[in-house]
Structures are given as C-alpha cells and as structure tokens.
Image (spheres, rainbow, N blue to C red):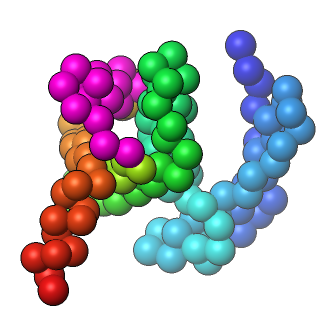
Amino acid sequence: MVKVEITYDGELRCRACHEPSSAEIVTDAPLDNHGKGEAFSPTDLVGTALGTCIATILGITAQSRNWNLKGMKITVNKEMATEGTRRIKSLETHIWMPISLSGSDRIIAEKVPHSCPVKLSLHPEVNVPVIFHWPEQVRSNHEKQK
C-alpha cells in the first residue's frame, strides 16, 4: 500500500506528498471551475495517470520482447461532461510508436493499454479510445499532405 498525504493550501490549491519518495505535486482547480488553472487539476491527473500507466506497461512489455520504445509519445485529451454531474466524459489517448511492429508483436502492443490498471479502474461511462500511430502511418500521412 502506498500513502499519499494531501494538504489543502487554500484558494482551491492542494499539495500532495508521495510518502515513499517524498515527491510533491501541486493541484489547482481549473479556470472553468473557480480556480486559477496554474497547475494540474485533479481530473488532469486522472488523464496523466492513464497515459503514464499505459507508457509503463508498454515499457514492461517492450523489455520482455526487446522492443526499443524510447521516444514513444502519448497524449491524453481529457473532455469533461457538459451536462449533469461534473465528471470526465472522455480520455482520448493517442500513442505515437517510435518503431514499427508487425504480426503478433503489433497485436500484443495494441492490446497492452487495455490492461492498464488505471484504465480498468475508471467508471465504465468514461470513454477511453486508444489510437496508435505507427511510424509508417505517420510517414504516409506526411507524404499525402505534400
């Protein structure tokens, strides 16, 4: 079990300390919810947790399969629901792979994000599409734009 200690600093800002490492993060309410938007919001951290979790488990898979994923980029586009209870509506996740994989390796890589513990912990109403961008697709798209 990991302990995180959170202190409310006032003005909708919190400071969280990760006990095992003493690392700290600050959160701030977003501009659209009475905050200053000067740091990650709590819901931003959900998207951050999802993206870093996916990167980590892809990295674990890569180590066991001798894939070099250094330079892999992941973006998570968080969308909040605009009606009803304030909640995360969608966490659209894009993964830019630095290497091409084919056959069973590609199938494995594309399945890995769906076993991410953060993704599995999200409410089923949160839409979490995961879109891979492979080097050959990126090159092809650039060539089409020329």
Q: Position of residue 144 (x, y in %)?
A: 10, 76
Q: Magenta region's main secondary structure?
A: helix
* Left or right of 75 in this view: 1: right
Query: For residue 110: magenta?
Result: yes
Q: Position of residue 51 (x, y in %)?
A: 46, 44
Q: Position of residue 5 (x, y in %)?
A: 80, 35
* Left or right of 84 in this view: 56: right
Q: In which quadrant of the rendered view does residue 70 lie?
A: top right
Between 138 and 9, the residue placed more toward the observer is: 138
User: Which residue is rendered at x = 85% and y = 26% of the image?
Assistant: 20
User: Which residue is rendered at x = 46% and y = 54% of the image?
Assistant: 73
Query: For residue 70: magenta?
Result: no
Residue at the top extreme of this rendering: 1
Q: Is residue 28 visible?
A: yes
Residue at the bottom extreme of this rendering: 146
84 over 19 or under it: above or below: below
User: Which residue is rendered at x = 58% and y = 74% of the image?
Assistant: 37
* Left or right of 127 in this view: 36: right
* Image quarter hosting the C terminus: bottom left
User: Which residue is rendered at x = 51% and y = 76% of the image?
Assistant: 31
40 over 119 or under it: above or below: below
* Image quarter hosting the N terminus: top right
Q: Tell me which segment is drawn in magenta.
A: 99-116
